[in-house]
Image (cartoon, rainbow, N blue to C red):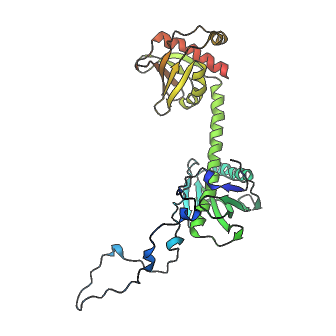
């Protein structure tokens, strides 16, 4: 997606449920029966003379001056939820405003930097800006469940309270199809959340990119050796964390002649089909071809903290012979070294 000041809501990293109808109104409005709007007004209950009234409070209608839409004015779209992608952050709603609370100043500084990066990427200028407050220019939204282009402006602030660090998103101006209008409570909540999710999604992307860079650095030197598991059986030991080695599998195994057919990170398994590489490959790595028959094998990876165990089973689920496992150990080490 090409980011600009015009944001396509449907492309955000946000769960949006939409009806199949092509009419935007039908995505927002309830269908069919609105006969309840023609219901007669309530009348006081008339009791027989001398009767003592007994009422259950379960269905008592609350008293007060309530305002809101009725009939087709009711927006039936599911409410937006803030994506909890910032580790340790707690979401708090005050009316339609969204506040994220963090425990450390360093985390808030990173979130604040993310806000500025995100605004620059979508080409939204700051009308006013201080160290702790940004008032944005218009942000344009295009959505399949809106009749016209939506515009909104925001006040984004950060502050400290009770040894916590808050980040608040507040919608301050609203327009529909270029005309400034009062914003409904539903839309205020919805578009505050959408804008907050742009920040959290961008923050999560940065975290993933940083983790990938750290993993690449760690992978540059992974000592590989033979060892034993808790039962005393031989296994290959990679002296790197499990999640780091797991990220390398899509490139590591194919270079060794294995075509990955299925992976399951939570179970630590990778099913692959083996076909021995050609002579050019073995000459390049400087090793003799391993005595492994073509066929299907399963790699088993065990998380040992700062190390990872590697075992291999055949198509019947039986561990391969120890001599085959020992021949795989230098192959894995060489392929990793040459890959970096």
Q: Quadrant of residue 92?
A: bottom right
Quadrant of res 125: bottom right
Count of labels shown?
0
Q: Position of residue 286 (x, y in %)?
A: 64, 9
* Depth order, front residue of 98/194: 194
> Looking at the image, is 249 positioned above or below residue 134?
above
Residue found at the far left of this picture: 50
Task: Please state if 4 lies on the left or on the right of 20 as rendered.
Answer: right
Q: Residue at x 62, y 49 (%)?
A: 201
Q: Residue furthest bottom?
A: 49
Residue 261: % across, % down: 51, 27
Identify the image quadrant of the C terminus.
top right
Pick whichever, 208 or 255, lies toward us.
Answer: 255
Q: Nearest the camera: 229 or 47?
A: 47
Look at the picture and state if 112 lies above or below 320. Answer: below
Residue drawn at (57%, 48%), measured in percent from left and top? 85
Name the spot of residue 328 as percent of width and height, x first. 54, 14
Seen from the viewer's position, the closer of residues 47 and 58 is: 47
- Asked whether residue 96 appears in the rendered view, the answer is no
The residue at the far top in this view is 288
- Residue 138, compared with residue 209, is above or below; it is below
Q: Where is residue 322? Give x, y as percent.
A: 46, 11
**Can residue 221 be seen by looking at this rendering?**
yes
Q: Residue at x 58, y 15 (%)?
A: 331
Q: Is residue 83 left or right of residue 55?
A: right
């Amino acid at each position: 997606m090409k980011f600009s000041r015009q944001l396509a809501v449907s492309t955000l990293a946000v769960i949006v449920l939409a009806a199949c109808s092509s009419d935007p109104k039908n995505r927002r409005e309830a269908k069919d029966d609105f006969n309840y709007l023609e219901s007669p007004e309530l009348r006081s209950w008339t009791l027989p003379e001398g009767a003592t009234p007994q009422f259950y409070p379960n269905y008592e209608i609350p008293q007060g001056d309530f305002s809101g839409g009725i009939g087709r004015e009711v927006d039936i779209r599911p409410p937006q939820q803030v994506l909890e992608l910032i580790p340790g952050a707690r979401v708090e709603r005050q009316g339609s405003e969204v506040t994220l609370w963090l425990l450390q100043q360093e985390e808030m500084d990173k979130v604040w930097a993310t806000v500025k990066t995100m605004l620059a990427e979508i080409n939204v200028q700051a009308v006013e800006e201080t160290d702790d407050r940004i008032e944005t220019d218009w942000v344009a939204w295009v959505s399949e469940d809106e009749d016209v282009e939506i515009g909104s402006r925001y006040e984004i602030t950060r502050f400290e309270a009770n040894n916590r660090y808050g980040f608040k998103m507040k919608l301050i101006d609203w327009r529909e199809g270029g005309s400034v209008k009062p914003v409904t409570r539903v839309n205020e909540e919805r578009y505050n959340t959408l804008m907050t999710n742009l920040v959290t999604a961008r923050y999560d992307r940065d975290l993933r990119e940083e983790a990938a860079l750290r993993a690449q650095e760690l992978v540059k030197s992974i000592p590989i050796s033979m060892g034993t598991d808790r039962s005393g059986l031989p296994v290959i030991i990679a002296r790197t964390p499990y999640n780091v080695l797991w990220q390398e599998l899509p490139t590591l195994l194919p270079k060794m002649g294995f075509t990955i057919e299925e992976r399951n990170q939570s179970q630590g398994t990778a099913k692959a089909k083996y076909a021995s590489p050609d002579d050019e490959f073995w000459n390049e790595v400087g090793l003799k071809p391993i005595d492994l028959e073509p066929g299907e094998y399963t790699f088993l990876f065990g998380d040992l903290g700062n190390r990872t165990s590697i075992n291999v089973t055949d198509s019947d689920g039986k561990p391969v012979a120890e001599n085959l496992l020992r021949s795989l150990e230098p192959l894995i080490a060489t392929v990793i070294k040459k890959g970096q």
